[in-house]
Amino acid sequence: MGLGLSALTRLAGSKVIERAGLRKPVQNLVSAGTRNGFRVAGAAGRTFKSAQKLGKPARLAPAEDTGLFDLTPSEDQQLIVETVTEFAAEQLRPAAADADAKLHAPEGLLSRAAELGITLVGIPEELGGVGTERSVVTNALVAEALAHGDLGLAVAVLAPSAVSTALVSYGDEQQQADYLPAFVGENVPAAALALQERTALFDPFKPATKARRTPKGYQLDGVKSLVPRAADAELFIVSADLEGRGPALFLVESSNSGVTIESEPAMGLRGAATGKLHLEKVALPAGALLGGGKAEVFTEVVRLSRLGWAALAAGTAKAVLDYVVPYVNERKAFGEPVSHRQAVAFSVADIAIELEGLRLVALRAAARAEQGKPYAREVALARKLAADKGMQIGSAGVQLLGGHGFVKEHPVERWYRDLRAIGVMEGAVLL
Amino acid sequence: MINLEVPKKAGTLINQAYQAAAEVFRPISRKYDRAEHTYPAELDMFAALLDGLNSSGEGGAGAAGVRRSEKNEKPGNRNGSNLNIVLGTIEMCWGDVGLLLSMPRQGLGNAAIGSVATDEQLKKFSGLWAAMAITEPDCGSDSAAITATARLDGDEYVINGEKIFVTAGERADAVVVWATLDKTKGRAAIKSFVVEKGTPGFEVVRVEHKLGIRASDTAVLRFENVRVPKENLLGTPEIDTAKGFAGVMQTFDNTRPLVAAMAIGVARAALEETRKILTDAGVTIDYDKPVHSQHAAAATFLQLEADYEAAYLLTMESAWMADNRKPNSLQASMAKAKAGRSVVEITLKCVELAGTLGYTEESLLEKWSRDAKILDIFEGTQQIQQLIVARRILGKTSAELK
């Protein structure tokens, strides 16, 4: 240890790395090295202060069905999307490269995002929010707009809403009174929906994390993977198999003993500060079970989460399209813009076509979900397109820039890495 | 209010089109695939019913064309004839695309007349079954390069030239012919003319033997000094080089969603049949279980269904935009490109998944995969659609991006 440290010190003081501009990357290397495999306790959580509980849980009403095909967002939606788009362009995009390198969002960014009030739209008025009806479409448009700025940071911004939305939709009056006041307050807690696990061919309906009934409630054991903002999160919703009877969701506070966090940097989504959530003999009260452990609640959470990823994919894929168009128009080869070649132009056309298709399929699923119609099929198809076409678009983005796409001077290599998450990820976001 | 479901009020129309497709088209589908060039007489009675649907003004299952009238328009979201025609066409082509193309008075020429004719012309040509003749032996996608000519002589135009690949060219009562008034003036001089059967000098040279849509006759036509009244020119006779090609090309904004709808119908038929075959074979398709944990055939099916869904919604979008008077050239080409390539991929994959059950003539899967290919070719090939999309997205002219 001593020797290692002294070598590092000498390296850090070396004029050579200063001149070569290498100091920053080396520091990052060191910090990732100490983070990787190093476990810390969960974030020192607040004590969630309960509000007066309501007589029955507050829910958002389903959206109305006009019976007409319509692709025009409502005025409210246009306003929200405009605001979020601006935020994504001014706050997320410029911070994205740095967050990617440092594995976390810059100081203050996420609290500024919370001030946008994205979470409030999904919380009913009775509970201090501003929501009046289910707004899956609005949530999809917001996710899309954020991901146009940056996918990793979008996930970081949306992570707490996944938890608050689940509490609104499935929490009982006590759970809503215990936790939702914090989400409508000044200082919105970091929170995360943790479904993902470390296994090939992961099926969210078959979690390896186990929940056992105890005289006082439940005991959880297992490891969750790629949990956004894991180290900062004060509240988790965790999936676990309840005594062999299938998956159920549990509310886990970071201060629970047995909760530890391990940094888990990945190919992409690095701005989301993903981590492993270790659960070792975590004792939970009986009131920690969400949605009564019902199978349909769990199924809905999985579907609405997948829909979230599809919307995110559409946003980042649009970022790719918007970036490659001016590039191929300006980049010259053989005396004219490369976009004058069909091989290049058709690749751009394909991005546009597949993106629009993906977007429409995701929106259809969202509209069906908020109207209370069956939407399993539509979500499955949106997820398939998001995984396949999203990645295809990410890959085409790098290809169209050639060598310039491969270096970090341009963001397309980051989008390439981020878009691979679609199709892998379960949970984390929820519309 | 974003909603991507079929409009409620279209329910009756869809149901009628579905009944017709199931009761009229499907039972004779194989018969006319085998008996190429035989007129499906069963369609006559049924065509009368469609005429009724189209004259209702809300559009039916065929090619009523699109009239962009400005009167009596309420503000706000409209679900009108474009969506209805697309929805009707999907159902009918779920039945049989070749037979839909053989429907009397539902030709693409009718769509052209419906879209660009003046009110007087509309009256004059009502009840006529009109085919569309654009392609020539030496010019296909570059329709600006057509060589057929129309020369004004007194009160008549004199038309000369040869046209190929004319759908319903033998059976239709008339043909909408694209010809140039003046070759030196380029695309702006290209106009369309209604030429009725029996006009001296107008001859059907032969009908083609084809890969698919065999129920539909595809003709080679010859025009030798064919004289038509000058009122038969659709749109304006002026050669406006500034506006260029707009007049005749406008038709495509309305017909491309229709061809996309045909592709959707065929793709839907193939997916439904394949789902049945796979279910019988013990393969379940699960929308919640991760794709990679399912049977490979189920995973393939999900991928095909996802492409189908994207193509379907792109088609709906382009028709909805037309209903709401939004320029839809880009979306129409996107829909056509996606639907055209998807229907080929879907139907061919379905044959592969179904094995001999799909490849033999016992099922219609092999027929649908032969029919499908034309849908990625006519009304603008896949490559032409990509060119149009690319030019729009990149902001390029046809001179820059060739």
Image (cartoon, helix red, strand yellow):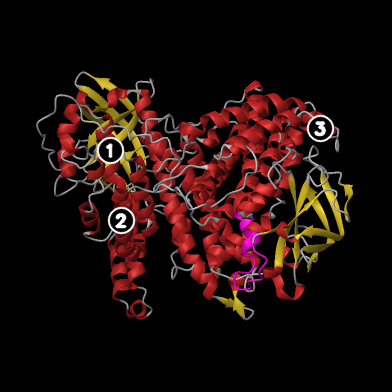
Of all chains, the one bearing label 3 is: B
| Residue B137 in view in this figure | no
**Nearer-N-terminus badge (1/2):** 2
Which residues are the magenta region? B236-253
Amino acid type at mark 2: Val
What secondary structure is marked by label 1?
helix
Q: Residue A84 shows which numbered tag?
A: 2
The residue beneath circle 3 is B32
Q: Are marks 2 and 3 on the same chain?
A: no
Q: Are marks 1 and 3 on the same chain?
A: no
Residue B2 quadrant = top left
Amino acid type at mark 1: Thr
What secondary structure is marked by label 2?
helix
The residue beneath circle 1 is A165
A355 lies above or below B371: below
B164 lies above or below A376: below
Task: Give the CA separation, mark 2 to mark 3.
Answer: 57 Å
Q: Position of residue B162 (x, y in %)?
A: 85, 59
Of all chains, the one bearing label 2 is: A
Q: Could you tell me which residue is drawn at 36 percent across and 79 percent down?
A: A16
Q: Residues within 10 Å of mark 3 (few under 14, many from 20)?
A: some
Residue A409 quadrant = bottom left
B259 lies above or below B245: above
